[in-house]
Image (cartoon, rainbow, N blue to C red):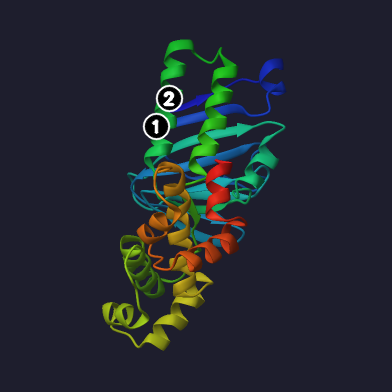
Amino acid sequence: MIYPFHSTDLTESLPVGLRLFGVSHLQPPVKRPDGVPYFQWFYCIKGQGELILNRQRFLIRPEQGFLICPNDPHSYQAVTADWTLHIFGFDGSLCGELLKTLQMHASGAYQFTDGDLFVHHIETLASLYNTHGCRNAVDFSKECYSFLLDISNSITRSRAAGNAVENELTDTLTSYLERHFASPVTLEELARIVNLSPDYMCAQFKKEMGLTIMQYLTEIRIGHARHLLTLHPEKKVLEIGKMCGFESPSYFGKIFKKEVGMTPEKYRKSR
């Protein structure tokens, strides 16, 4: 179900304002060659769909979502009849800079390491709406801002999909890496799983995903590290690194700074 919000002088003046939200929305096909005039976040809770963006195709499954920035042409449709989404639509004078700071300013598909955050904020919005209707714009604005801060710690970019054979290979590998990111992983081990030579496996993965297997694994590990640094302030940085598959504290710090732009310690303080 979609809950739209009508613009008022107050909502137009807010730095972050809610434009709509959707709860367990059974998604029909959508094609928008001119985009929409506000930001939209989508999170898949059931089924499978596809997003077409910049002539690339992304498969969207549970625990995945996608961000659409204002005026970006796009389309999306169900692959399975039960494709169901939660939806946030928002805008405001602060949104562009805020999303840029939170490293999610580009339209695209994303993997969530903690999808419960999205669900929690959708449920909070529904509760506010059921209590006050759409009258209390300031409370909805606060919830939007909180939502953006929270999910910034739990997303990593997904890559475009290719043909069916390549999809099967990359799906197998990405699924394995997402389940075993905290353990040591070798190319030889992965090659045995997909029954291919390491060289051929690596070439196909890079062709399909646009990055190497180890680069993809690093993205997963850093995504989890960002989330855990905020979730567990009582744990030492080296403990967080080990929980995410980094045995060397110095290497963890080096890679984290390269990927995020600051040290783990500074990132934790900034949250």
User: Where residue 210 sits in the image (x, y, percent)?
Assistant: 54, 72
Frontmost residue, 48 versus 92: 92
Query: Badge 2 is on which residue?
Result: 124
Task: Give the number of the disc on residue 92.
Answer: none
For the question of whether residue 154 can be seen, the reply is: no
The quadrant of the rendering that contains the N terminus is top left
For mark 1, give the secondary structure: helix
Frontmost residue, 135 versus 182: 182
User: Where residue 93 sits in the image (x, y, percent)?
Assistant: 72, 32
Q: Residue at x 48, y 51 (%)?
A: 226
The quadrant of the rendering that contains the C terminus is top right
State which quadrant residue 53 falls in. bottom right
For the question of whether residue 213 can be seen, the reply is: yes
State which quadrant residue 142 falls in. top right
Q: CA distance from mark 1 to mark 2?
A: 6 Å
For mark 2, give the secondary structure: helix
User: Where residue 187 sits in the image (x, y, percent)?
Assistant: 37, 80
Vertically, is 98 above or below 76?
Answer: above
Vertically, is 31 above or below 192?
Answer: above
Q: Answer few, some or many: residues within 10 Å of disc 2's Cα (few below 14, many 20 plus, some between 14 and 19).
A: some
Q: Residue at x 47, y 83 (%)?
A: 203
Query: Badge 1 is on which residue?
Result: 120
Vertically, is 137 above or below 91?
Answer: above
